[in-house]
């Protein structure tokens, strides 16, 4: 997955969870939870959405790397 | 128009799901109502046949306005029944105004949800009234003295005023506005009808209020903030709050959660909030002074724990729909219910019973990074539990200093009903339950 595809995937997964959330507005290093007002249930749904679209299992210990935009893009665009 | 939460004063029927002539059953969803907060599915609380719809779609009306008339099932059956000897000239069809007051919703679920004060129970006994057959008009469906009086057989009622009292001004106003006082639910002492009740029952659109369907999101937002503000001001004015907090070691709960989630795919994993809510619901079942309603100077404990969960809405605002019978849910069930509730609170539709019968509220602001919450009690409830963020702290235990995941639980309690001793017992119970998560 390219970085642009990863960004687009994040957008489409977030849309039903937080319709007004704009990942382009999230500053570097800022967590998605804080920047987009996601609570733990929203975040879990976000991770579940990513796992489902990429058909991968995302273990809980990887949650931390998914909590920023750039972390998420790296995670999704790195083959594993 | 039901009051779907004490902070609502008007709503718009966006869709009728029944038509005149339709058969309806207790618990059926009959309409969708838009409030400042959300779209809500309104349930009916009796069996019968819809006679007419009094408020068209798209019109904003005050709480208490008659929305429809329903002929009750038994009368309807009598009417269609084949030849009844000496049928009365006028068919005695009892028309019940469907005003699903905040009240009504709890009786929709099961009778166990209903809490009557001892005073009301005594009165019912004296007057020979079956409480299960009475529709409560008090806050959250509680049967009030006026309801019992109204339901009393006529012989005993004769000694009481057959019609609820109303002030001369209210009567004059009713005449001017074309309101039938029989259709009005009084909010004054003993159900007496006040000026505001009459104004509330005025048929047709509320003159100055903008129709919710045309209101911009900003207007809705402002109006919702005003409504919340008014309710919280009332709480701060009337409820003598006391506050307690306790730090809880979540090592055991965190380990349990980690172990449980390891075996699950992402969609089936649990979050800590599910455990915190489970522990709160079970603990409150053991400390009844925290669970119920304070109405008319009297506390009525509730047997069922209907846990109101504060959910922030996108774009601001707050809503606290109930998870019914929360004390009986496993962490998995709790997680499923909370997830469903969050999803519906933000994008979909909530049910009227979910919005009006929470018996205690829990708020979990931990995700936003605060350490502890000092909440304002949501009247007529008498307690609110808050959880801050779960994070690692130095923790001294058995002479050793370690680092453990902790959360601060707070309790806002109502001093008219409970005190610090009972509050401490309640928080202690939550802590004890969270130390043994496998038993939740």
Image (spheres, rainbow, N blue to C red):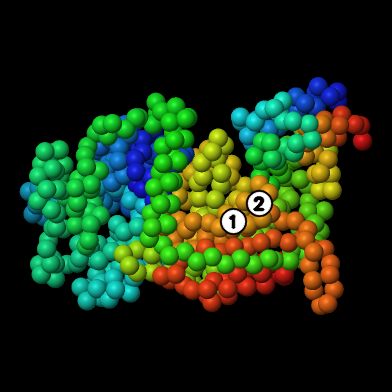
Q: Nearer the viewer, residue A49 or A25?
A: A25
Mark sitting on residue B238: none
Q: How crowded is mark 2: few (under 14 residues within 10 Å), some or many (20 or more)?
A: some
Question: Which residue corresponds to the image point at 47% horizontal and 29% vertical from the top-left?
Answer: B217
Q: Specify whether B53 is left or right of B84.
A: right
Residue B214 rendering spot, x and y as whole percentages: 39, 26
Both on one chain, marks 1 and 2? yes
Chain for numbered disc 2:
B
Residue B278 rendering spot, x and y as whole percentages: 62, 62
Look at the numbered discs 1 and 2 and tell me whether their residues touch, using CB distance below 8 Å: yes
Kindly identify which residue carries mark 2: B370
Question: Which residue corresponds to the image point at 44% horizontal and 27% vertical from the top-left?
Answer: B216
Mark sitting on residue B373: 1
**Residue B81 appearing in the image:** no
Residue B123 vertical position relative to residue B410 in the rendered view, above or below: below
Question: Which residue corresponds to the image point at 55% horizontal and 35% vertical from the top-left?
Answer: B315
Question: Which residue corresponds to the image point at 87% horizontal and 29% vertical from the top-left?
Answer: A77
- Give the image quarter of residue A39: top right
- Give the image quarter of residue A54: top right
Label 2, secondary structure: give it. Answer: loop
Q: Specify whether B4 is left or right of B330.
A: left
Q: Specify whether B29 is left or right of B243.
A: left
Q: How crowded is mark 1: few (under 14 residues within 10 Å), some or many (20 or more)?
A: many
Q: Which residue lies furthest to the right in this view?
A: A80
Label 1, secondary structure: give it. Answer: loop
Q: In the picture, which quadrant includes the N terminus of chain B?
A: top left
């Amino acid at each position: 997955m390219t970085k642009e595809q990863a960004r687009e995937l994040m957008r489409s997964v977030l849309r039903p969870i937080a319709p007004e959330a704009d990942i382009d507005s999230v500053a570097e290093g800022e967590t998605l939870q804080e920047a987009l007002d996601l609570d733990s249930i929203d975040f879990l749904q976000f991770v579940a959405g990513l796992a489902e679209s990429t058909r991968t299992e995302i273990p809980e210990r990887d949650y931390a790397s998914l909590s920023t935009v750039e972390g998420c893009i790296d995670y999704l665009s790195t083959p594993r | 128009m039901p009051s779907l939460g004490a902070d609502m004063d008007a709503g718009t029927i966006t869709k009728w799901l029944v038509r005149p002539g339709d058969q309806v059953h207790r618990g059926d969803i009959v309409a969708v109502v838009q409030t400042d907060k959300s779209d809500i599915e309104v349930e009916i609380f009796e069996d019968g046949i819809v006679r007419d719809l009094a408020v068209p779609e798209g019109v904003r009306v005050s709480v208490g306005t008659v929305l429809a008339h329903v002929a009750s099932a038994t009368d309807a059956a009598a009417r269609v029944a084949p030849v009844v000897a000496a049928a009365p000239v006028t068919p005695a069809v009892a028309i019940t105004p469907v005003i699903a007051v905040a009240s009504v919703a709890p009786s929709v679920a099961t009778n166990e949800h209903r809490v009557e004060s001892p005073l009301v129970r005594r009165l019912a006994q004296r007057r020979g009234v079956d409480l299960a057959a009475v529709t409560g008009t008090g806050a959250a469906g509680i049967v009030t003295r006026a309801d019992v009086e109204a339901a009393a057989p006529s012989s005993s009622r004769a000694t009481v005023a057959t019609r609820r009292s109303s002030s001369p001004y209210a009567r004059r106003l009713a005449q001017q506005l074309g309101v039938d006082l029989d259709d009005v639910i009084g909010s004054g002492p003993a159900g007496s009808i006040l000026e505001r009740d009459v104004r509330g029952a005025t048929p047709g659109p509320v003159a100055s209020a903008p129709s919710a369907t045309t209101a911009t999101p900003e207007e809705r937002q402002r109006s919702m903030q005003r409504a919340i503000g008014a309710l919280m001001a009332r709480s701060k004015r009337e409820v003598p709050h006391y506050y307690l907090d306790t730090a809880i070691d979540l090592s055991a709960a965190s380990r349990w959660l980690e172990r449980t989630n390891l075996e699950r795919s992402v969609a089936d994993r649990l979050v800590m909030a599910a455990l915190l809510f489970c522990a709160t619901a079970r603990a409150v079942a053991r400390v009844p002074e925290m669970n119920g309603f304070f109405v008319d100077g009297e506390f009525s404990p509730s047997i069922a724990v209907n846990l109101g969960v504060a959910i922030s809405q996108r774009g601001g605002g707050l809503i606290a729909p109930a998870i019914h019978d929360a004390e009986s849910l496993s962490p998995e069930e709790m997680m499923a219910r909370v997830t469903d509730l969050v999803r519906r609170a933000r994008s979909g539709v909530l049910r009227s019973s979910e919005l009006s019968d929470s018996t205690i509220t829990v708020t979990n602001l931990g995700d936003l990074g605060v350490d502890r919450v000092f909440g304002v009690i949501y009247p007529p409830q008498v307690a609110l539990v808050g959880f801050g963020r779960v994070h690692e702290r130095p923790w001294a235990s058995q002479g050793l200093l370690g680092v453990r995941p902790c959360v601060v639980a707070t309790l806002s309690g109502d001093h008219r009903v409970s005190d610090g001793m009972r509050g401490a017992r309640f928080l202690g119970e939550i802590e004890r339950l969270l130390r043994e998560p496998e038993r939740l």
